[in-house]
Image (cartoon, rainbow, N blue to C red):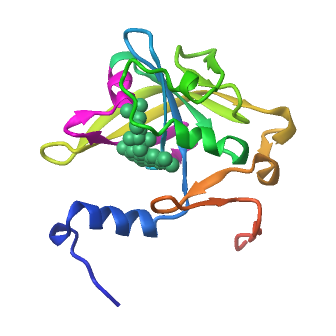
């Protein structure tokens, strides 16, 4: 078995090992709006729900050529964001919004998506998504010295879900058709191979 000391590795190799092993990752499709009023949308797979009470999600964003990505700039400016759930029907559009567009470009328009303003926060979510969360920034934690990534901790305030997916508050995973991310260009669907495992009493 090979052993790697992370401090000895080039950044690209750390990235390949971690994103190849921590799989599949959910994709947070993060909607924000900048201080100039321009909407922004981008996918982040350093993303997860880490607590239900309090309802908490996290997003990890790297930098681009030494500058923060538009999502992070907007989060710092406005303190609010949405997370649209990436499902089979919107996966191409999700990929389109990962393009490195300048801050003045609205990725909703660029990808032909409907922007719906949140009911609790002023950030937009994807109208074509089957579900979306509205969130407020709780903390932005710099990672590294000097920082090269930022961990955004968000409080979930509101959840929108298509009625078709719901049985009370239970989500039908087969109808959700969520997408997971592997390393690089690798993705998976979550409907084939779905199984259940009851926990020990
Ligand atoms: C599926 C997918 C997941 C991604 N996950 C991340 C991530 O977790 N962190 C990150 O910094 N960039 C990630 N990216 C790259 C960003 O989406 C990309 O840099 C984008 O241009 C950022 O947009 P923004 O500047 O509007 O925030 C991901 C791209 C794809 C396609």
Q: Please name the residue shown 36% across and 66% down the image.
A: 16
Name the spot of residue 185 as percent of width and height, x first: 50, 58
Residue 71 lies within the magenta run: yes
Which quadrant of the figure has residue 138?
top left
Residue, far top: 36
Q: Please name the residue shown 77% across and 65% down the image.
A: 192
Say if 65 sits above or below 75 in the image.
below
Name the spot of residue 88 as percent of width and height, x first: 71, 48
In this view of the protein, which residue sits in the foreground, 62 or 150? 62
Say if 180 sits above or below 156 in the image.
below
Q: Please name the residue shown 33% across and 61% down the image.
A: 15
Ligand 1 resides in the quarter of the picture at top left
Which quadrant of the figure has residue 102?
top left
Q: Is residue 70 left or right of residue 68?
A: right
Boundaries of the magenta span: 47-76
Say if 174 sits above or below 82 in the image.
below
């Amino acid at each position: 078995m090979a052993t790697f000391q992370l401090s000895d590795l080039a950044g690209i190799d750390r990235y390949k090992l971690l994103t190849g092993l921590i799989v599949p990752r959910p994709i947070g499709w993060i909607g924000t709006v900048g201080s100039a009023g321009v909407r922004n949308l981008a996918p982040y797979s350093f993303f997860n729900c880490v607590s239900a009470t309090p309802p908490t999600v996290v997003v990890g964003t790297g930098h681009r050529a030494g500058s923060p990505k538009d999502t992070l700039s907007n989060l710092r400016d406005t303190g609010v964001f949405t997370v649209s759930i990436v499902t089979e029907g919107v996966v191409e559009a999700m990929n389109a919004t990962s393009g490195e567009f300048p801050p003045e470009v609205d990725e909703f328009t660029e990808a032909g998506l409907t922007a719906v303003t949140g009911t609790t926060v002023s950030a937009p979510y994807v109208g074509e998504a089957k579900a979306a969360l509205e969130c407020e920034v709780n903390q932005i934690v710099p990672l590294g010295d000097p920082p090269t990534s930022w961990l955004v901790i968000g409080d979930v305030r509101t959840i929108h879900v298509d009625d078709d997916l719901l049985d009370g508050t239970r989500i039908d995973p087969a109808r959700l058709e969520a997408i997971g991310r592997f390393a690089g260009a690798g993705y998976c669907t979550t409907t084939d191979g779905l199984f259940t495992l009851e926990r020990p009493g």
